[in-house]
């Protein structure tokens, strides 16, 4: 019955086309083409109103202007530091959730850790501002306790930015860590211990190698989010924040210099992609596996 | 280490102290926000001047504009809700289609598409924002230069905000729905077909009900992420500000505790959403 | 029984008890294990055997009692300081290390130099027949090879005692049969004392020099596999070790060590009394399938034994282990009787009338326990 076969084939193709259409519209229309366009923008220069020539001027400006690359490097370093701190803070709590606490206690602790992240970053940052600013809760508490004579300004320091970034990123580290700790069979830890391993050796030889995918996933996501964060650095760091996304905003929205903004955007994207790639290479992971984990 | 291995007393104490300190770190900012929503003072700062509901109920005549009379804030909540509903509907629909595409269909280039679908998750939100802004403007310029048509929806504004948020939220929805579809036992569909059901009936009566929890979960996540989005929205926003942008603007100026009031409102709303979801979840598991 | 002289015992357990919130997992247990022997703890799941093993390993602290290993009390010794190593239920091979690294892991922890520990790991792998596999990943090995690595990893540390936590449990039947033999050969080659826990009575019988049958936190019986099989001390052991027919009834008459038991429907059977049986008391009689003889007519049965009539319900052909299921005529009770290995009765048919008899000395009668 060739007729039926043809109908079935035709229908299968129709279904495939219907399923492919939204995916392609999304990926091509909202991801690929805009990024190609951004690349084109970054490689041109305005010579007269509405007249452009291909050029590397935008990138030259970046390297010629110390402010740009200074902020760029600073953002990268602080982001790396924030990622490391987040890992250090999240590691023990994830271990407690996955391995020390049991049953209901573990589930409850996990839930409690997730609750703050149901609230928007704006609200959380507001909390830190009320806590830390000169007229805020912590400075007045310090004065009250006689630790400082005058209320001190705790906002607008690099450390403040780091606290805010770590706070905002915790969830994205705790979740993959708990996942990879939970999948570690207790038997392996007991066996290592039974064979004479102590805490440090077990951590180094068993736990970290096992959790490497989770650690990588967490670090990649946290680094990426930190690098691209705008809200926390500008609010907690104020004028001193010098975060790279601010430069982006200034060029794009305030100065309307899209060519320069596009170049800066591409540099940020390049850095973020390089770190993702490096993270994957170092831990020998596949991109799709890591993202699924996160 | 784990409970079956001997843990010295100091380690146990240290663990408990750490968990305690961690929880304080986690909740102090939120508690502070909530508490100062009720402070009878024009700024959310100590000292405590007594309890008041002015920051919720106050109107122009009392000199303090409370949340329920702050038209700008209420308007931005409405804007955020509208945007979030659009993003949710789009993301869940496209995410479900993507899930079927990736789990069921075979076609050349599927591997590339699978990786592409994950990339929005590792592109910083600011970049997504500016690239869509630039591309949309180019299209709008093109339309106006070539056809003399003013495509306003391609200029900064809510439609672009929706598209910008959708561009990465749909990736999360796709992952959530795919994960459940992957675990679906396809013999159930075969059984239904064998019992005489049509393909449409199988989808409607067997497959979609199975996917329900994932669809609901994806919708909740999409709504929340859209409502809270800042980075992408900042670059695409026009005259109407969603709540996060509005709050950001006011926070830079140093705002009254009405911001604490709206924050508390958000906390309660998200707590309710979270609890509902978790109850559904635990019921489903039983 | 187990030699009790302390000099020859590698493991001594005295009055050991452990309670968890709602139940006593191990109750006042005392036993010792001779040096170089293979000792099994056999019991159904939940009998407390895992708790016992983990107390010996040190992962669980006993409520009371004492554990002595190699003559040294373990009360204050941490699990990683005990001269004991463990083969875990799922083997717990470290997937992040090669086979040789797995074996060298414990040596590295003891501070043995790299060259030396690799040499010793290689030597140990050779002893277990995995000479060329040192560089393989653990998931490249077969189930049997993985088990050998797990044993090698422990044995390289030369423990006084090797504890094995049902390592065969996760294997399929055929591999399990093979590993049983391999395990026994490895043990006799190393000469190390093995303490093995299992719920599989066949494993315990095949492998062990001595077996402790555990139930509700206590040993029901401690003895050689032969003693457990031919002279079970309790009704539980008779039912748990090997196949058995359990026939309940009440004691009709007691004469010396023989009892006449009235089963259902007035069927009378004669059995050997274990312990004191009072006339009229409820009892349970155990007859092994191979202890009974089956024939088409009474003339085919041994002289001087009670002859019972039955009908064939089902024939289960399994080579040398073939049995017939039959229903006794007067009581309607179902029994399992081994078919002769000669194939003499291979032509039996379902529903056919047959007779059977058994030596009363090989049918054991226990006073019925309240909880049995």
Image: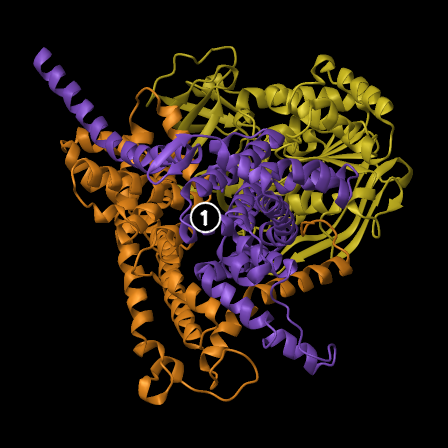
Q: Position of residue C287 (x, y in %)?
A: 54, 33
Name the residue beneath numbered marker 1: A251
Answer above or below: position of B17 versus C265.
Answer: below
In this view, the residue in front, C102 or B61, is B61
- Residue A255 shows up from this direction: yes
User: What residue is at 77 percent from the left and 60 percent from the top?
Assistant: B10
In the rendered structure, the answer to whether residue A257 lies left or right of residue C37 reads left
Q: Supply the letter of whichever chain is yellow.
A: C
Closer to the camera in the image, A238 or A101:
A238
Asked if one can make out residue B183 in the rendered structure from this viewpoint, the answer is no
Tell me where residue B75 appears, x and y as whole percent.
28, 67
Seen as rendered, the residue at the extreme right is: C7
Question: x and y percent of residue B92 in the render?
Answer: 29, 45
Q: What residue is rendered at 57% in x and 84% in y?
A: B47
Q: Quadrant of residue A185?
A: top right
Residue extending furthest front? A48
Q: Foreground residue, A290 or A186?
A: A290
Task: Name the residue at 41% across, 18% down.
Answer: C296
Which chain is in orange here? Answer: B
Q: Residues within 10 Å of mark 1 (few under 14, many from 20)?
A: some
Chain rendered purple = A
Element marked by disc 1: helix
- Chain at numbered mark 1: A
């Amino acid at each position: 019955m060739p007729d039926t076969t043809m109908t079935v084939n035709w229908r299968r193709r129709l279904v495939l086309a219907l399923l492919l259409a939204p995916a392609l519209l999304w990926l091509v229309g909202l991801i690929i083409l805009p990024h190609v366009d951004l690349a084109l923008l970054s490689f041109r220069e305005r010579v007269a109103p509405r007249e452009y020539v291909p050029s590397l001027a935008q990138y030259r400006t970046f390297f010629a202007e110390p402010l740009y690359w200074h902020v760029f490097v600073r953002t990268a370093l602080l982001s790396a530091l924030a990622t490391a701190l987040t890992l250090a803070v999240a590691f023990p709590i994830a271990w407690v959730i996955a391995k020390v606490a049991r049953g209901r206690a573990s589930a409850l602790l996990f839930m409690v850790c997730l609750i703050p992240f149901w609230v928007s970053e704006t609200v959380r940052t507001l909390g830190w501002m009320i806590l830390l600013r000169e007229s805020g809760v912590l400075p007045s508490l310090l004065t009250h306790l006689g630790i400082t004579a005058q209320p001190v300004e705790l906002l607008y320091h690099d450390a403040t930015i780091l606290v805010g970034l770590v706070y905002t990123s915790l969830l994205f580290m705790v979740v993959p860590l708990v996942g990879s700790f939970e999948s570690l069979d207790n038997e392996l830890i007991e066996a290592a211990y039974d064979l004479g391993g102590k805490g440090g050796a077990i951590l180094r030889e068993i736990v970290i190698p096992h959790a490497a995918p989770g650690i990588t996933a967490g670090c990649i996501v946290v680094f990426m989010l930190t690098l691209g964060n705008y809200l926390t650095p500008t609010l907690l760091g104020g004028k001193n924040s010098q975060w790279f996304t601010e430069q982006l905003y200034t060029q794009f929205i305030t100065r309307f210099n899209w060519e320069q903004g596009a170049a800066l955007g591409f540099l940020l994207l390049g850095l973020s992609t390089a770190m993702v790639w490096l993270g994957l290479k170092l831990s020998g992971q596949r991109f799709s596996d890591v993202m699924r984990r996160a | 280490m784990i409970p079956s291995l001997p843990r010295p007393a100091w380690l146990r104490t240290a663990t408990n102290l750490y968990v305690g300190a961690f929880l304080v770190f986690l909740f102090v900012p939120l508690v502070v926000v909530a508490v100062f929503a009720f402070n009878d003072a024009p700024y959310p700062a100590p000292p405590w001047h007594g309890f008041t509901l002015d920051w919720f109920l106050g109107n122009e005549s009392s000199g303090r504009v409370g949340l329920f009379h702050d038209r700008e804030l209420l308007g931005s909540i409405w804007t955020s809700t509208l945007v979030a509903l659009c993003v949710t509907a789009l993301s869940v629909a496209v995410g479900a289609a993507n899930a079927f595409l990736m789990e069921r269909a075979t076609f050349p280039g599927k591997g590339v598409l699978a990786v592409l679908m994950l990339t929005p998750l590792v592109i910083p939100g600011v970049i997504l924002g500016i690239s869509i802004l630039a591309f949309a403007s180019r299209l709008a310029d093109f339309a106006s230069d070539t056809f003399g048509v003013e495509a306003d929806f391609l200029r900064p504004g809510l439609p672009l905000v929706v598209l910008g948020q959708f561009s990465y939220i749909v990736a999360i929805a796709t992952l959530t729905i795919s994960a459940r579809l992957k675990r679906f036992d396809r013999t159930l569909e075969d059984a239904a077909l064998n019992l005489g059901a049509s393909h449409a009936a199988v989808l409607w009566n067997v497959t979609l009900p199975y996917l329900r929890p994932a669809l609901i979960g994806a919708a909740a996540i999409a709504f929340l992420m859209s409502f809270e989005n800042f980075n992408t929205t900042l670059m695409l926003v026009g005259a109407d500000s969603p709540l996060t942008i509005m709050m950001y603007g006011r926070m830079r100026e140093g705002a009254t505790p009405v911001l604490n009031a709206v924050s508390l409102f958000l906390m309660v709303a998200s707590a309710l959403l979270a609890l509902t979801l978790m109850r559904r979840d635990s019921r489903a598991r039983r | 029984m187990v030699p009790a002289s302390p000099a020859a015992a590698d493991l001594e357990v005295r009055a050991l008890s452990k309670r968890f919130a709602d139940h006593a997992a191990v109750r006042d247990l005392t036993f010792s294990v001779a040096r170089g022997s293979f000792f099994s703890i056999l019991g159904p799941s939940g009998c407390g055997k895992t708790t016992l093993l983990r107390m010996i390993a040190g992962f669980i602290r006993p409520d009371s009692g004492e554990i002595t290993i190699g003559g040294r009390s373990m009360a204050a010794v941490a699990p990683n300081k005990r001269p004991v190593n463990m083969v875990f239920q799922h083997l717990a091979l470290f997937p992040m290390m090669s086979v040789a690294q797995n074996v060298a892991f414990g040596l590295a922890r003891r501070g043995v130099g790299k060259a030396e520990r690799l040499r010793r790991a290689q030597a140990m792998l050779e002893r277990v027949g995995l000479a060329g596999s040192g560089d393989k990943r653990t998931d490249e090995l077969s189930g049997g090879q993985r088990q050998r690595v797990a044993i090698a990893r422990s044995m390289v540390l030369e423990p006084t005692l090797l504890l094995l936590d049902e390592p065969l449990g996760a294997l399929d039947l055929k591999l399990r049969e093979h590993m049983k033999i391999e395990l026994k050969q490895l043990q006799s080659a190393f000469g190390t004392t093995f303490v093995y826990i299992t719920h599989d009575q066949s494993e315990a019988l095949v492998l062990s020099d001595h077996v402790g049958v555990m139930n509700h936190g206590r040993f029901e019986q401690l003895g050689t596999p032969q003693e457990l099989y031919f002279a079970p001390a309790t009704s539980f052991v008779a039912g748990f070790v090997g196949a058995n027919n359990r026939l309940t009834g009440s004691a009709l008459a007691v004469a010396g060590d023989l009892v006449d038991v009235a089963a259902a429907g007035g069927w009378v059977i004669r059995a050997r009394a274990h312990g004191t049986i009072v006339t009229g008391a409820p009892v349970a009689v155990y007859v092994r399938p191979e202890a009974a003889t089956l024939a088409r007519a009474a003339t085919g049965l041994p002289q001087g034994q009670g002859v019972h009539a039955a009908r064939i319900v089902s024939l289960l052909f399994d080579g040398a282990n073939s049995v017939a299921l039959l229903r006794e005529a007067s009581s309607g009770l179902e029994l399992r009787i081994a078919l002769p290995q000669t194939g003499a009765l291979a032509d039996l048919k379902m529903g056919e009338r047959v007779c059977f008899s058994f030596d009363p000395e090989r049918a054991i009668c226990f006073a019925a326990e309240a909880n049995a």
